[in-house]
Amino acid sequence: MANWRGVLSDIAYANYISSLRTHKLDEIKNKASRFATDLLLEVWGVRNQAQMIDDKSTAITDLASRLRSKVMQTVTTGQQAGMTPLFEAAEEVYGALSELGPLDEIPFMPYTDSRGECSAFDNKALEQGEGSTLLRSAHHAVGLDAVGNLEQNVGSTSEDADLSHQIEQDEAGRASTRARYAPIISSTHLESVEFPKGDYATFLRVRSSLSGALRNVRDQLRQYKNMLDETSGHESGNIDTQIAMQVLASGDMRNDIFVRDEIALKEEAWAILIDASKSTSYFLNDVKGITLCLAEVAKDLIPSRKQWGVYAFNKSLYVIKDFNEPYSVDSKARIGGLTPNYSTLLPDAILSCYGSLLASPAENKIMVVVSDGYPVGYPDIDKSLTEAIQKVSRTGTMLIGVGINNPAIQDFFKVNCVLKNPYQMMKFFVRAYAEVSAAF
């Protein structure tokens, strides 16, 4: 409010609009999720009679009142109260929900930060009344019609049409990718193939914070690329004296007497698999920073865009950069939108990522797995992880395990290391690429 005194009014209006989008609560089958959605609306004062759950109405009203009171206690007293009231509020919510069973999703207002899937709110644009002239004008100013669709009528620009066409192409491309991966994950516990929501602004902020480390690693990359293979028979470069003398003596009309230094391209395919489960969110070095660093280095290090891909996983497989895609703004935005959540289905992710590697024509295949090393999601998952690693290794694919500030990864991967920050991660990847490429 120090910077924008109208912020509370804006939040109140956003909450009101969100409440209009709320599905009927009795349509939410999971008891805990239904209660949590009802509580969310009551806390923000936008719960109406049609949405109330009769048998829990009074309890939710009383709980919401206590929650608001504890939050305001922290806000008004500041450091004197510390975090105790917030912890007490969290314990109250946990106690109320624990009696109803596990949450299948966390409800959140549509305009706030995403906490994963949330089906409590309708995703369609709201119909606006005839009298909402100003609201319609606001829609028009950003290229939308009265119901939130891109304007395609008289007065719409070609840029709007191009944007709409691009969105349709992007959706078709994602649908094609999902269809291609569907048979790969069908035999695993993974629920789906997803694309993280794009957030290019966050990508730029994270890259800016790591710019110094990226610059240092790129210096190392230049030194590595100076180790070149000498090839002859070119029409430009340094003169090969011996061949030049032979050409002069024979009188041949040849100009391929030059030697040039070139990088010997390796037929390798690299897959980078990042743990984006809930457990990794507790590490200081967040998932976005690690993913960004490895992708930026792979872009400079690996010659062809079709020779490397980046994936993440929790209960689903997330495509950051497919082998068929360029490392474009879309891929970078997916890194910015990647959020740790859900279970750690590591063995299933390894098998699925290997399935994508199989499509590469490269003879040598390498998979770098970055995880905290604690698979979680179903009984005997540790055993499944060992079996998955053995299965992939027997195909000749090299598996490299990288522990995020945790030595547990050493229990599963023969080739492994434990790193603490993105800079170490980048240096290790450069060294691993050089050593593995030399070994093939």
Image (tube, rainbow, N blue to C red):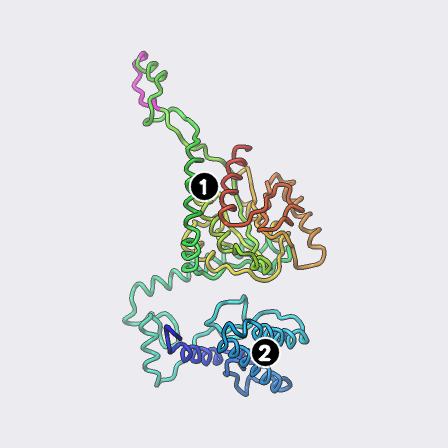
Mark 2 vs mark 1: give the one in front: 1
User: Distance from label 2 to label 1 (Cα)?
Assistant: 51 Å
The numbered dot on residue 319 is none
- As helix, strand or loop, the secondary structure at mark 2 comes to helix
**Tag 1: residue type?**
Leu
Q: Residue furthest left?
A: 155
Of 73 and 218, nearer the camera is: 73
What residue is drawn where x is 41% and y is 52%?
328
What residue is drawn where x is 41% and y is 40%?
219
In the displayed structure, does residue 168 sit left or right of residue 280? Answer: left
- Residue stretch in magenta: 249-258
Q: Which badge, 2 or 1, is on the more N-terminal residue?
A: 2
State the quadrant of the N terminus: bottom left
Question: Residue 266, image x and y in percent?
Answer: 49, 35
Residue for badge 2? 27
The question of residue 232 being in magenta is answered with no
Residue for badge 1? 301
What residue is drawn where x is 39% and y is 29%?
261
**Tag 2: residue type?**
Glu
Q: Is residue 345 above or below residue 323?
A: below
Question: Residue 431, image x and y in percent?
Answer: 51, 39
Mark 2 in CB contact with mark 1 (< 8 angstroms) = no
The crowding category of the residue bearing disc 2, from other C-alpha atoms within 10 Å (few below 14, some 14 to 19, many at least 20), is few
Question: Residue 425, image x and y in percent?
Answer: 52, 46
State the quadrant of the C terminus: top right
Which quadrant would residue 397 be assigned to in this image? top right
In the displayed structure, does residue 70 sit left or right of residue 241? Answer: right
- As helix, strand or loop, the secondary structure at mark 1 comes to helix
Of 195 and 413, nearer the camera is: 413
The question of residue 257 being in magenta is answered with yes
Q: Residue furthest top?
A: 249
